[in-house]
Amino acid sequence: MIPVGLTEIATFIGEVTILIGAIAPVWATMRRIKEGTKCQLRSEMLRIYYHNRERRVIRQYEYENFILLYEAYKALKGNSFIDKIWAEVQEWEVVS
């Protein structure tokens, strides 16, 4: 085992602090991008929902798109509000 002195420990701590300082802004930016993406996904699902809500009929391509949007939204840890919309859309008639 190689003995480690205080100088090496201080150097290591300094390097870790620099890395954290460099990573923190990137992490914050990624969080904002994630939140923005969730907002866009939710907005598009709601657009599809309100477009078809009265008739309770959805076209096949809209339904397939809705599925992809929902899966992406849930993968980003989207809230349960959209789950209620999802459940309602599942009851609609899907047409070509």
Image (cartoon, grey):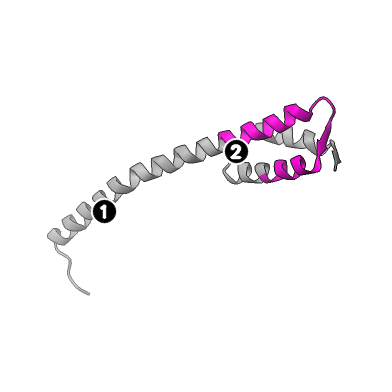
Q: Position of residue 7 (x, y in %)?
A: 12, 59
Res 31 seen here: yes
Residue 78 has which mark?
2
**Left or right placement of residue 52 versus residue 69 in this view:** right
Q: Which residues are magenta?
A: 39-68
For the point 60% across and 46% down, which residue is it? Answer: 75
Instruction: Using the rendered view, name the quadrant where residue 94 is placed.
Output: top right
Q: Position of residue 71 (x, y in %)?
A: 66, 46
Helix, strand or loop: magenta stretch:
helix
Q: Position of residue 80 (x, y in %)?
A: 65, 34
The residue carrying mark 1 is: 16
For the point 58% across and 35% down, which residue is it? Answer: 40
Q: In 3D space, how far apart are the residues under numbered discs 2 and 1 (Cα atoms)?
A: 33 Å
Q: Position of residue 20 (x, y in %)?
A: 30, 48
Is residue 87 located in the magenta-colored stretch of the structure? Answer: no
User: Above or below — where is 10 with respect to 44?
Assistant: below
